Image (spheres, rainbow, N blue to C red):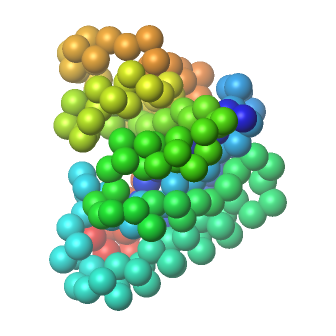
């Protein structure tokens, strides 16, 4: 079974996330796409933002519930809380390693945005990810991928150039609601 891992904070999940996931399922060889909701993204958040472990848990549960609701009834899409039981912060290499242990017969593909591939060399164990997993990269409006990509130069990276661009971000939504 081919599984796409679409990781993120999803704070909040929005129609761009869901629209892209539906497009990926319909236009690639993936059997399923799992929204891997991150309890604590090492590149974006600090536990102090949540104030306490209880706030972190509450925030995670709300985001999980929102993702489940957003994809309810859409074939091939699943919400996953797999990272919740893993050490924090949630490093993708660790998540993928643990997924392989739990599901040895599955083939996992990482789905990331162009903004993340531009800083991929900052990810923990990015060489391990490149050596062991396929990566689908979707375009992000306003992202310019620099020469860093030429350093990565991997056959495992597939650009989803035909994917639709959604002019929305979780950051913009939070700002419009007066949240950080």
Q: Is residue 72 above or below residue 157?
A: below
Of residue 143 and residue 156, the one placed in the foreground of this image is 156
Quick check: 29 above or below 10? above
Q: Residue at x 34, y 57 (%)?
A: 90
x, y percent for residue 172: 37, 59
Q: Is residue 23 visible?
A: no
**Picture residue at 50% right of the left edge, 78% below the top:** 61
| 152 vs 120: above or below | above
Q: Residue at x 35, y 79 (%)?
A: 56
Q: Position of residue 131 (x, y in %)?
A: 39, 22
Q: Nearer the viewer, residue 112 or 134?
A: 134
Residue 10: x, y in percent? 47, 60
Q: How many marks?
A: 0
Q: Position of residue 29 (x, y in %)?
A: 70, 25
At horizontal 53% and vertical 41% (from top left) the residue drawn is 100
Q: Is residue 133 left or right of residue 51?
A: right
- Position of the C terminus by quadrant: bottom left
């Amino acid at each position: 079974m081919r599984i796409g891992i679409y990781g993120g904070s999803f704070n909040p999940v929005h129609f761009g996330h869901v629209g892209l996931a539906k497009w990926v399922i319909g236009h690639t060889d993936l059997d399923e796409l799992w929204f891997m909701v991150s309890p604590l993204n090492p590149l974006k958040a600090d536990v102090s933002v949540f104030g306490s472990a209880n706030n972190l848990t509450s925030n995670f549960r709300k985001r999980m519930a929102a993702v489940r609701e957003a994809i309810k009834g859409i074939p091939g899409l699943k919400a996953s809380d797999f990272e919740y039981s893993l050490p924090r912060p949630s490093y993708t290499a660790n998540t993928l390693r643990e997924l392989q242990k739990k599901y040895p017969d599955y083939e996992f593909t990482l789905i990331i945005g162009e903004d993340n591939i531009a800083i991929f060399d900052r990810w923990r164990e990015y060489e391990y990810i490149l050596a062991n997993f396929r990566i689908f990269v979707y375009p992000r409006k306003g992202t310019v991928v620099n020469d860093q990509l030429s350093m990565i130069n991997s056959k495992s990276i597939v650009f989803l150039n035909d994917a639709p661009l959604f002019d929305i971000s979780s950051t913009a939504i939070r700002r419009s609601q007066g949240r950080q």
